Amino acid sequence: MDLVCRTTIVGDIATLQLLGEIDLASIPVLHDATVRLVADASGHTVAIDLDGVTVVDDTGLGVLLGAAARAREAGGDLILVCTSERLRRRFELSGLSRAIEVRTRLVP
């Protein structure tokens, strides 16, 4: 399955909504989308909505970490929105959730 990326504004937060699988084949699409998201909202918190994602491989985790680093370097931050218990567990086991805030909904 291809990865579909759509940018939207939720409240006042630029949000990248993803649908599909994050794997080696979709990394270029994800990387380009996260670079644009962070650049367009430089200095602000941005979000990536993973509720439409079924798989995140290790390279995908690296792209998410890189996006968070770029957002912080630009004076903002990045949060992940994910309700999938399986993906949330993966983020915990990999340590990603210690580096990036993972929420079950965008607005606390």
Image (cartoon, helix red, strand yellow):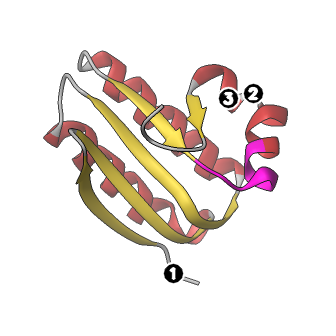
Decide which of tag 2 and tag 1 comes sooner along the chain.
1
In magenta, the rendered stretch is 82-88
Asked which secondary structure carries label 3, the reply is: helix
Q: Which residue is mark 1?
A: 2
Q: CA distance from mark 3 to mark 1?
A: 25 Å
In terms of depth relative to the viewer, which is nearer, 11 or 86? Answer: 11
Outermost residue to the bottom: 1
- The mark lying in front, picked from 2 and 3, is 3
Label 3 crowd bin: few (<14), some (14–19), many (20+), radius 10 Å:
some
Instruction: Name the secondary structure under disc 1.
Output: loop
Looking at the rendered structure, the secondary structure element under dot 2 is loop
Which residue is denoted by mark 3 in the rendering?
Answer: 97
Residue 88's place in the image compared with 68, above or below, is below
Residue at 68 percent of width and 21 percent of height: 98
Across and down, in percent, residue 100 comes to: 56, 27
Q: Amino acid at mark 3?
A: Ser
Task: Say left or right for 42 vs 87.
Answer: left
Looking at this view, name the residue that lies furthest to the front: 108
Give the number of the disc on residue 80.
Answer: none
User: Label 2 crowding class (10 Å Cα cut-off): few <14, some 14-19, many 20+?
Assistant: few
Q: Is residue 83 magenta?
A: yes
Where is residue 20? Give x, y as percent: 56, 74
Q: Residue at 27% across / 59% down in the picture?
A: 7
Q: Residue at x 52, y 40 (%)?
A: 80
Image quarter of residue 102: top right
Q: Residue at x 57, y 61 (%)?
A: 51
Q: Is 19 on the left or on the right of 104, as rendered?
A: left
